[in-house]
Image (cartoon, rainbow, N blue to C red):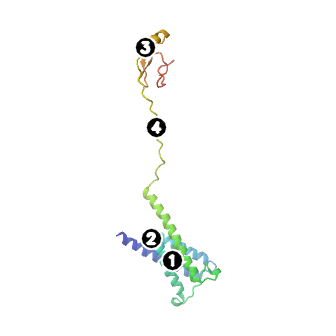
Amino acid sequence: MENMVSLVRLTVATSASFLIIALFSFIEHFGAGMQELIAIFGIAVSALIASLVARSMLASAVSVAVGGAFALLLTLLSPYIFYIELKLWNPLGAFGILEAFGRILLVGIAVGISVGISGMLRVFEAQKKEGVKPPAEEVVEVKEEKPETTPTPPTAREAAVQEAVGVPTETITCPGCKESIPSDAIFCPLCGKRVKES
């Protein structure tokens, strides 16, 4: 089924490319003084439409190349088919190169434009499928864990020194770290939390 859809898109893109380039070639013949603009606008429109319809770089390139080649053939055969010899702009005319080669160059430029447009469309579709861009990496704050210190009860000698110096041996539990601290402490010596008002 997907191959069938791709084939239909390729056919429609090729037909559109042929019709647009052929139509602009006839308009260019009658657009005296604006032939360059009409020719450039024609290949740009052909490339854009083929890219939008084909939705593939290869398919759009093939459709513009084939459609442009048939449009070029039609314009070259116009004196025999329509009895009108089309006067078309030749981008290579300044170099003395035949009009047919100048028009082939324009078709080649149209192929390049269609590939570029298809590439951009492909990027936009990929971004649309992904949805919103992922947010920048979140910075995870890592808190340094302080090693657990378990208070050891003072030895008999330390208790004697504390009593002699006048350090109270009474302790309270710190509300922050839940450790035993001296009862007269304003701040916990272990975690730094305020224990009582001064």
- Count residues near mark 1 (Cα–Cα under 10 Å), then give few for <14, some for 14-19, many for 20+: many
Nearer to us of marks 1 and 2 is 2
Q: Is residue 184 left or right of residue 40?
A: left
What residue appears at the point 58 percent right and 74 percent down from the top-left corner?
40
Which amino acid type is marked by label 3? Glu
Callout in the foreground (4, 2) = 4
Element at label 4: loop
Measured from the top left, where is residue 192 in percent x and y? 49, 25
The amino acid on which the numbered mark 1 sits, given as a three-letter code, is: Ile
Amino acid of disc 4: Val
Structural crowding at the residue carrying mark 3, measured as other residues with C-alpha within 10 Å and reported as few (<14), some (14–19) or many (≥20) = few
Assess whether mark 3 and mark 1 are in contact (beta carbons under 8 angstroms): no
- Residue 177, quarter of picture: top left
Q: Which residue is mark 3?
A: 170
Q: Secondary structure at mark 3?
A: loop
How far from the left and from the top, in percent, is residue 90?
60, 80
Q: Earlier in the sequence, mark 4 or mark 2?
A: 2
Tell me the residue at 50%/69% (across/down).
115
Q: Are marks 4 and 2 in contact (CB under 8 Å)?
A: no
* Label at residue 86: none
Q: Which residue is mark 4?
A: 142
Name the residue that disc number 1 marks. 20
For residue 167, above or below residue 56: above
How crowded pointer 2 is (Cα within 10 Å; few <14, some 14-19, many 20+) is rated as many
Report how far apart the C-alphas of labels 1 and 4 lie in the structure: 63 Å
Q: Which badge, 1 or 3, is on the more N-terminal residue?
A: 1
Instruction: Name which of mark 4 and mark 3 comes first in the sequence.
Output: 4
Q: CA distance from mark 2 to mark 3?
A: 87 Å
Q: Nearer the viewer, residue 109 or 74?
A: 109
User: Marks 2 and 3: which is nearer the front?
Assistant: 3
Nearest-to-viewer mark from 1 and 4? 4
| Residue that label 2 marks | 54
